[in-house]
Amino acid sequence: MCDYTQVEYRCGHRRYTVRAWCTNYETTHRRCPPSVVAVEYRLDERCDQEHSNPNIEGGKPSSG
């Protein structure tokens, strides 16, 4: 399985970034189920999603 880092942002969203591709992926380029091996907290950042959470300090309500 490929190793991933779970990244948590202050807005509450999570992202998964690859730490290392497994040998199966390197030969087939097909992703296997992720194996989260670390968690990183970026509580001073919001993710890059268009909308923002109005419950978070500094957030703006989304339109729509």
Image: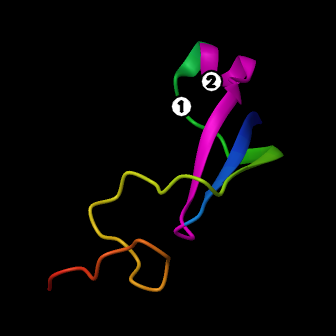
Mark 1: secondary structure: loop
The residue pinned by badge 1 equals: 30
Tell me the kind of residue under disc 2: Tyr
Tell me the kind of residue under disc 1: Arg
Q: Look at the numbered discs 2 and 1 and tell me whether their residues touch, using CB distance below 8 Å.
A: yes
Q: Earlier in the sequence, mark 2 or mark 1?
A: 2
The residue pinned by badge 2 equals: 25
Instruction: In the displayed orientation, state which residue is furthest to the left.
Output: 64
Q: Position of residue 15 (x, y in %)?
A: 56, 52
Q: Which residues are magenta?
A: 11-26
Front residue of this view, candidates 17 and 53: 53
Q: At x 14% / y 86%, what residue is drawn?
A: 64
Q: At x 24% / y 79%, what residue is drawn?
A: 62
Front residue of this view, candidates 52 and 7: 52
Of the numbered discs in the image, which one, if any, rests on residue 40? Answer: none
Front residue of this view, candidates 34 and 37: 37
Image check: 46 left or right of 16?
A: left
